[in-house]
Amino acid sequence: MFKTISDRHPRDQALPARAFTLATLKAVLDGTFYDVQPYRWHEERNGAGEYVPVAMRAPSIRYGLCRMVVEDSVSLLFGDCHFPAIQCDDEATVDALKALTKEIHLDLTMTDAAMRGSVGSVALLVRVLKQRVFVDVFDTIYLNPTYDPEEPDRLVRVTEKYRVKGADLKAQGYAIAQTELGQDFWFSRAWDDMEETWFIPQLVTAETEPARDDSRSVTHKLGFCPWVWIKNLPGGDGVDGASTFKAAIDTQIELEYQLSLGGRALKYSAAPTLLIKDPSGEGPGKISAGDAIMVGENGDAKWLEIDGSAAKATLEYVRALREVALESIHGNRSNADKLSAAQSGKALELLHQPLIWLADKLRLTYGECGLLPLYRMIVKAAQRYPIKVAGKPVKLSDAHELTLNWPRWFPATASDRASDATTLTTLTKGGLMSEETAVKQIAPVYEIASEQGELAAIAADQAKADARSVAQQAAVAATVVEPSTA
């Protein structure tokens, strides 16, 4: 069914094949996949009275299973209490990046990127405007990346190209003739290590190369292409990774159509078809004012009713389909109704293990290959242009390596924290772990803003305790009376 309905979606032959694939997957994700169906679910007959096959109709019930799995995995990736902490030997750089993350709401940006990128890929554009950093999320349907052949992991150019109506261009300030308002134009831009180049839109029928639009082009001179291209999951094809939910699309479609058919059966049970048997051949009897059915002497009338076994079988089949779909894409199959008491963080991890396996892969792609390169790009940009955070200039050092520290999958309970405290105390006292490492381990749990500041506070508290101990010992020594000698 997925391929059957996909073939009804419009396809631009002038664009790469990957553009159509990403567009159809995006339609599944945002719920517009069935918009191309020629009939709605209630339209069982067309204008000529002919029966409309189910495959030609859009289901009446939508069960966004694919989107739910994406949302669950992204919530474990960048949701509340799951956003990774930046680590660096330079405290000033760490503090500046933390403040920048809050100012530009980078957690929301990365959440949006992970949602959009679940189709296969997503791209982030970094801009520095008026000494402020901005990060924009782009779908990759109309983007095409170019990598350095001698450094295959270094992005050197990104181009954007898509169709747009002349009327839309005119609304944006372009000089479009009145006779061309309804025609299609190519809109294109390109980014490299020195500038952002805009091109003058031209008709799709034109055979010449587009001319540069000097009035809109910008020379940034950053020395690097300001894009971060993120592949969703290992696998995929070319510049796109594997989709998070593609393996479950056919099952979701079957599930939605079965639910729609089940709903149709329930509606039929509420208003079954009336069958009137009239051997006289004079046609159906008439319905009186009291809704009594009048038939001939040998006639008969009955309701064509169905029992509820079919509806029950449909629900069982739907449950089985749901389990198959979730298992195929590592979705969450746990049932909250079976939890009788509060669970520890480790127990919750075991309960959501398939979903955690999926989120663990996403941590590599959107963390190590997405968020971390984004931070490094911002640091590089700060070497070229001054950057302000919350209205104050900040200094970002590029002399130190940046790393990410991911929190636990689920918040630690009181028993978890007690167990961690015992373990860390034993390791530090036994000389197997430094206090600095121990503080780093508990910093996300207790929301410690600065690890070095916490160590300084610990040292200050210890100094005060030592001073009190010395004072107490001196007071005790002063009250002791020396025994007299005979």
Image: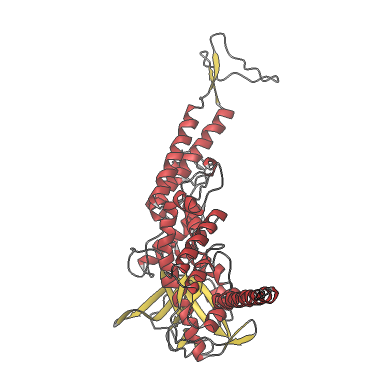
Q: In this view, which residue lies farthest toward the left?
A: 150
Residue 7, picture quadrant:
bottom left
Q: In this view, which residue lies farthest toward the front?
A: 486
Residue 205, picture quadrant:
bottom left
Residue 47, given in percent of the width and then of the height, sits at 51, 43
Front-lying residue, 22 or 348: 348
Give me the residue at 48% from left, 27% from top.
309
Residue 424, given in percent of the width and then of the height, sits at 48, 64
Q: In this view, which residue lies farthest toward the top?
A: 297
Q: Is residue 96 left or right of residue 316?
A: right
Q: Is residue 327 left or right of residue 458?
A: left
Above or below, comparing residue 216 to residue 302 in the picture: below
Residue 18, picture quadrant:
bottom left
Front-lying residue, 74 or 196: 74
Q: Is residue 392 left or right of residue 41?
A: right
Residue 81, given in percent of the width and then of the height, sits at 55, 63
